[in-house]
Amino acid sequence: MEKNHKLATSTSPLLDNVEQYRWLVGRLIYLSFTRPDLAYSVHILSQFLGAPRHDNWNAAIRVIRYLKGCPSQGIILHSDCDLSLSGWCDSDWASCPLTRRSLSGWLVFLGHSPSSWKTKKQVIVSRSSTEAKYRFMVAVTCELKWLKGFHRSLGMHHPKVMSLFCDSQSALYIA
């Protein structure tokens, strides 16, 4: 899906067959459990389940074309895992054109394998990009701590320190 898309402000006609759109997006949601590269697109498409438009349908078909073009993508679990947890997060300040809320995402790795990922619209409207990124750094830190506790309950101990990566120097200084 393109950056700066205009799906939220689309004026194309409503779809006649709403159930077909819901069925397709439901399948994409199920598929996104093993394909973290679909998280953003599925997040955007699922916002229009109530009243989908033709532009939404075309965007969903574009995701299907992407899947057809790269069927071998997915999660690869490496057997030589060093049991280190690391997280990457990013936030797009005020990216929703209707609510001006920030869209954020994270990806957590166990060794070199993805373990957890999420794309979400933030609950609160942030006043700056630094605030938006800092809020999601807090969210991914909670996820890292939860995963470490979950792994500990399974008998897995993490000898290394957890790492968190963010592209905002000002958010890192605040943290």
Image (tube, helix red, strand yellow):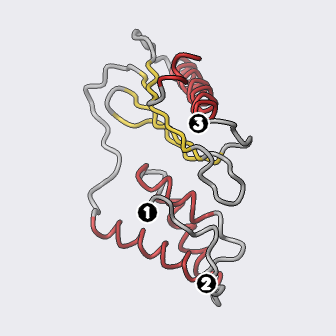
Q: Closer to us: mark 1 or mark 3?
A: 3
Q: Which residue is mark 3?
A: 129
Q: Closer to us: mark 3 or mark 2?
A: 3
Q: How far apart are the alpha carbons under marks 3 and 2?
A: 31 Å
Question: Mark 1 and 3 residues: CB-CB less than 8 Å, in contact?
Answer: no
* Amino acid marked by disc 1: Glu
Which callout, 3 or 2, points at the residue further toward the start of the chain? 2
* On-image quarter of the N terminus: bottom left
Q: Is residue 49 left or right of residue 143?
A: right
* Amino acid marked by disc 2: Ser
Q: Position of residue 132 (x, y in %)?
A: 62, 35
* On-image quarter of the C terminus: top right
Q: Residues within 10 Å of mark 1 (few under 14, many from 20)?
A: few
* Amino acid marked by disc 3: Ser
The tag on residue 2 is 1
Residue occupying the point 57% across, 83% down: 54
Q: Which residue is mark 2?
A: 12
Q: Position of residue 7 (x, y in %)?
A: 58, 69
Residue occupying the point 49% across, 17% down: 155
Residue occupying the point 58% across, 36% down: 129
Q: Is residue 172 left or right of residue 113?
A: right
Question: Mark 3 and 2 residues: CB-CB less than 8 Å, in contact?
Answer: no
